[in-house]
Image (tube, rainbow, N blue to C red):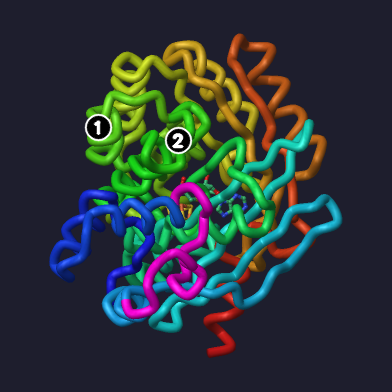
Amino acid sequence: MKAPLTGMSIEALAEYVKSKHLQRFRAVQIADWIYRKRIWDPDEMSNLPAPLRMELKTDFSAPSSRVETVSSSPDGTEKLLLELQDGNHVEMVVIPGNDNRTTFCLSTQVGCPVRCVFCASGAGGLVRNLAAGEIIEEFLHGTKKTGNLPDNIVFMGIGEGLLNFEALETVLKHLTSPEGFGMAPRRITVSTSGIVPGIRKLAALKKEFTLAISLHAPTDEIRARLIPDAFRYPVAEVLKAADEYRDTCGRMVTLEYTLLENLNDSREAALRMAEISRNHHAKINLIPYNQTNRGFRRPAERVIREFQETIEKNGGTVTRRRERGASSDAACGQLRDRAERRR
Ligand code: SAH
Ligand code: SF4
């Protein structure tokens, strides 16, 4: 597979143009197209000489993905199914919010090795990691759709970003650096199933990225029913890493909690989550399960409300994820699931 052109730093582009015996300003022009004009198909880079445009297309995968389908929900959520250069698929979602704000939800892998039992993304395991440039292209497709940079980015699409750390780190750098897209780290949320070494590596960047950890359960016993052994870390270790993250990066950590009927929705679990929220100064984000026909059910609305109230009344901080796009397969990985079944 060829390297995507997107995700190349200006230094890397400078090396490339040098190898072609061209002047450095050509690298600056290419970076300007990608990072300022958000144009990444060399054919459209009108101030480059035609031979260079052709060479870029030969040497790189550019563009390295195309929008296969867009599915829109009545609430305005748009989910883009992207086909990659090797025929694999990932998704990115454009989520509208209040006051014209938009959030992009990005994928980091094709499939996912963690294989949480309720999640469509992990059903077939990991196919491959995404290259940094492929993740940047998801972002670029989003900006092309909206005409603008997003207000927020969440890495809550397909895959476990902290298990593709090198690419994720490169993407975070391009998203936040002034030569890149210049976004504030606080506006970027990295969501993880609780990969402890990955949380430490993210903390070591010492940036104010928002960290969301998919805890889903207050005890190892319940958690073991949702996340298979291979990539599951003990609750105590995950919470310790969360504390370290908060202390190093100065950001309150969010604990995501996908609510599943009769699995993790008991009053006892809510009480323990309240305790965890208090002891770790963490915010709990409830995500009522989005049905994907995997044999799991979302709890009744009354149970969801009681779960939230129990946490609140016992001194915990809790929010409920605003559900968007539920009508158009917006739960993680569902579009890809279908596309792959068609192949
Ligand atoms: N791998 C990372 C990020 C991607 S999943 C992680 O697990 O955190 C993002 C969030 O979506 C996770 O909290 C996950 O539990 C949740 N999720 C996955 N499938 C879901 C579904 N069908 N309904 C509700 N939440 C789901
Ligand atoms: Fe992977 Fe996250 Fe899905 Fe678990 S919930 S299988 S970690 S994408």
Given contact means CB atoms under 8 Å apart, are the residues at marks 2 and 1 in contact? Answer: no
Q: Where residue 19 appears, x then y in whole percent?
A: 13, 67
Label 2, on which residue? Answer: 182
The quadrant where residue 20 appears? bottom left
Which of marks 1 and 2 precedes in the sequence?
2
Which of the labelled discs sits on residue 251, or is there none?
Answer: none
Say which of 86 and 221 sits in front. 86
Q: Which amino acid type corresponds to the residue marked 1 in the rendered image? A: Arg
- Can residue 191 be seen from the camera position used here? no
Q: CA distance from mark 2 to mark 1?
A: 24 Å
Q: Secondary structure at mark 1?
A: helix
Q: Where residue 264 appears, x then y in whole percent?
A: 57, 40
Look at 45% across and 56% down and name the residue there. Answer: 33
Give neighbour class at mark 1: few <14, some 14-19, many 20+ (Cα, 10 Å): some
Label 1, on which residue? Answer: 200
Q: Is residue 29 magenta?
A: no
The quadrant where residue 219 appears? top left
Look at 33% across and 23% down and name the residue there. Answer: 245
Q: Secondary structure at mark 2?
A: loop
Q: Is residue 15 left or right of residue 231?
A: left
Q: Which amino acid type corresponds to the residue marked 2 in the rendered image? A: Gly
Look at 52% across and 31% down and name the residue there. Answer: 187
Q: Which region shows up in magenta?
A: 35-51
Tell us which disc is closer to us: 2 or 1.
2
Q: Is residue 45 magenta?
A: yes
Give neighbour class at mark 2: few <14, some 14-19, many 20+ (Cα, 10 Å): some
Q: Where residue 184 appears, x then y in whole percent?
A: 47, 29
Q: Is residue 156 above or below residue 1?
A: above
Q: Is residue 268 above or below residue 115?
A: above
Question: Where the N terminus falls, by quadrant?
Answer: bottom left
Q: Is residue 178 left or right of residue 237?
A: right
